[in-house]
Amino acid sequence: MKRMKDNSLLRRPAAIFGVLVAFMLVAASCGSSGGTDTTEANDSDSETTKAEGEASGEDLEFATVVKLTGVAWFDRMEEGVNDFGEDNEGISTFQQGPAESDAALQVQVIEDLIARDVDVINVVPFQPDTVEPVLKKARDAGIVVIGHEGASLENVDYDIEAFDNAAYGRHLMDELAKEMGETGEYAVFVGSLTSETHNIWVDSAIEHQKETYPDMTWVGDKVESTDDADVAYTRTQELLAAFPNLKGIQGSSSLDVVGVGQAIDEAGLQDNIAVVGTSVPSISTDLLETGAIDLISFWDPALAGYAMNSVAKMVVEGETPESGMDLGLEGYDNIVVEGSVISGSAWIDVTTENVDDYPF
């Protein structure tokens, strides 16, 4: 496929992208977690969606609602959302979200899109249970709803995950254990205590540590960063004061390891404390190079944005996703479908050795 003009990793149906993307587990979204029975999850599939019933010649509107605007992760996702619209004649795509990490504000964005009468709403929920009522309202209005990072969502046609979330959490713990020499105290961060995927990652990681690395010890509670690097920085300073023997930290939000790394760097503890977590190179490369962050892992948000819209288009056109299908994207070329949850295999590990391969 042709390469995106901005070096995106998207592989489009017409040709194959030259950039290698490997992935990791589904997430919160994983085929193995939270999937509902296909019959129940897709009750409305037998009904005509609003998009199928439209006879006008106007473009269909596919909206993507993210947790938060103005951060690198979702800026990258927007590239995939926009590219899907460029690649599919007759479909207009755009991305919106709240300016703050607030579940109520995200609900209001979705309410506005329902009033706008869009054809599709893709959503990355900040707090899954909070958006359920408004997503039901959208589906009742004939709007196709696709989730991402929300495998437990019930009021969706499908939820698509980059990988199995539990497996991803175990993978991050393996990497953290390697950096810690499989011994010592560690802490875990989540963007929000209500974030489904983040909690699956750290819960799976902690369980895996207890079963596999008995000489390691989780200290404190789950640390909430509110998806804010400054908050993560402050919380890390507090951890360093409370646990002077701390040897490792695992982050979940893309901004967690950034704030953590800044605090570690400032304290000169790069060689004493291992830092591993989800992030993207554009905001973490400097700290990888100083050693304040040891490894980041991620899935390409642009691919996820494109994949959500691809599944939405299938639903609009009356198609049913099936295991083994190739969505035409790296990491989503052999999907697994369990109930309403679709899983890919698209995680990427990045250190100083390969960070330059991912310019986003």
Image: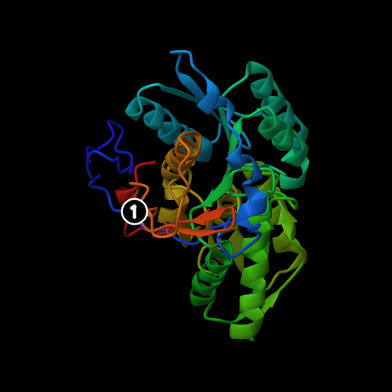
Q: Along the line of sight, which residue is nearer the eye, 192 or 25?
A: 25
Vertical order, 23 against 258 (above or below): below
From the top left corner, tell me how far across and down residue 162 is, in percent: 48, 54
Residue 322 position by quadrant = bottom left
Query: Is 71 displayed left or right of 347 in the figure?
Result: right
Tag 1, which secondary structure?
loop
Residue at position x 29%, y 38% from top? 7
Vertical order, 51 against 254 (above or below): above
Residue at position x 51%, y 50% from top? 279
From the top left corner, tell me how far across and down residue 205 is, in percent: 62, 70
Query: Is 309 displayed left or right of 18 in the figure?
Result: right
Q: Which residue is mark 1?
A: 21
Q: How many numbered discs?
A: 1
Residue 247 visible in the shown view: no
Query: Is 240 displayed left or right of 169 in the figure?
Result: right
Q: Quadrant of the N terminus?
A: top left
From the top left corner, tell me how far across and down residue 92 is, in percent: 45, 22
Q: Along the line of sight, which residue is nearer the eye, 64 or 227?
A: 64
Residue at position x 51%, y 40% from top? 73
Q: Amino acid at mark 1?
A: Val
Query: Is 114 displayed left or right of 176 in the figure?
Result: right
How packed mark 1 is, by other alpha carbons closer than 10 Å (few <14, some 14-19, many 20 or more), is many
Residue 3 position by quadrant = top left
